[in-house]
Image: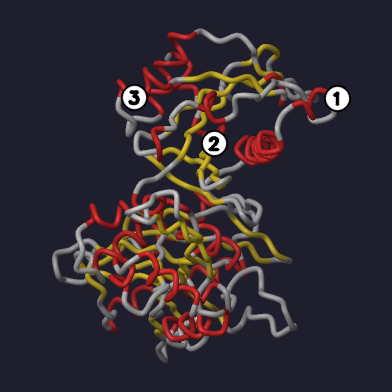
Amino acid sequence: MLVVKGFCSNDLMVSNTPNTVADFGEISTQGLTYAKDVGVYSNNTHPNLTLYTFKATVSNVSTPLDGNIVEHILTVLDYAYVQGATVSAGLNNTQFATLLQTEFSGNAAGFSCGPMVISNTKAIPEWITWYNTALGDNTTNAIKIWLTDFAFRSQYDEFQIVPVKPLAVLDDFFKTPTAVALELSAINTTAYFESIQVTRNNLPETTLQSKTFNYVDPINPTNKIPVNWAVLIYGLAGNNNDSISDALVSFILANSARPRADWVTIFPDIFKRTEFILLPLWDQYAIPNRIVEVGIYSPIVNVNRTLALYKTQVPSYPEAHINLNFDILSHPYMSLQIMAVGGPDNREGISNIANVFKDYINVPTTSLDFNRMSQPTKNWVLEMNTLLLIAESMTDFSSIPVGYTRIKRDGKLYVSRSYLNVNYLVSAKQNFDTAISGV
């Protein structure tokens, strides 16, 4: 099966105003960084269109597109652009999809369109998906093409992560701790950025992240050395802690002669996730939402219901582990209650939130009692305030502040932030749909 995901630009709609990207028909320079190798296709039949492919695979193996499929895709998109510029201003996305299905019923099926984008007299969907059914190879070809840059940059779900070695030979981390410290100290800022440039290899990334993880002396675990691990991320979807950790683990093991168990000992923060998954009771109201007033969450919890709900929402954690480490904490934001369990692989077995922030109290930051908590606990409370505000309104494609990451676990959406080398994942309100109310 051929799978194609890409963007189609239209020269007739491109804006040449400095620092401006057209509402549709133009891809930004950042959008072009969403894959290391972007396919570029055009032909004489559709001279104004250029197809950029960020994914083109057959059985998950990358492949160039042949002329027939390129012609098919450009024909569909040319028709869509023409309709969008002429007759579709009054159509919704479902009607636009029906228009396409009627026009291409002989060789395409399953048309679906994203929300309509309206600019001046034009109305064009953010994206179009369909199946090509008439290439003569007895296969169905799945195609998704974006027409608007802002939607592509926030919605494209593929990514590549390329780690940068902190040492030229990774297994040098298994030299004596003194030798490791000496080799790391020899790497200055200039050398660090030079290694990034070499790894980049003239392929600009969407974002560059540098994560700091402690090297732990296997002889004396109290001796720790912070080590910077840079990663080049192609595609915004890869900018999350889970994906970065997975990429680092795969990269390290692929470039090392040592087994995983040895690496767990010296880099536990990479190989063993230390985290807490927090589930606010977004579905439990004391005062429901009104037309002009937002609701207030209920401070009363049923232990049996909440425990069952947590197990449903976080199936990756063993049931016995949840039973042993399940905590419920109250929060001053809108009278919210939050379920919390630490990960089963957490360092030093820290899995109860009550044991991490023993002096936490449920008071607003404006209260005089707020300063009775320790500074680390106060800082965590401030982080939680921001995480809750983001989680309450975030969606799969909404913008979130820099420094916070969107994570998908078991089909559920979370916003994540690292604090004192521990990741805190807060469940998005959108996870708590009506199906949960019966739990």
Q: Residues within 10 Å of mark 1 (few under 14, many from 20)?
A: few
**x then y, percent, for residue 69:** 29, 76
Q: Pointer 1: what residue?
A: 368
Q: Residues within 10 Å of mark 2 (few under 14, many from 20)?
A: many
Q: Residue at the location (84% across, 24% down)?
A: 367
Q: Residue at the location (66% across, 53% down)?
A: 401
CA distance for labels 3 and 1 = 37 Å
Q: Disc 3 residue type?
A: His
Q: Disc 2 residue type?
A: Val
Q: In what element is the residue under mark 3?
A: helix
**x then y, percent, for residue 394:** 60, 42
- Figure check: 336 above or below 119: above
* Earlier-in-chain disc, 2 versus 1: 1
* Earlier-in-chain disc, 3 versus 2: 3
Foreground of the two, 251 or 269: 269
Report if residue 107 is visible in the image.
no
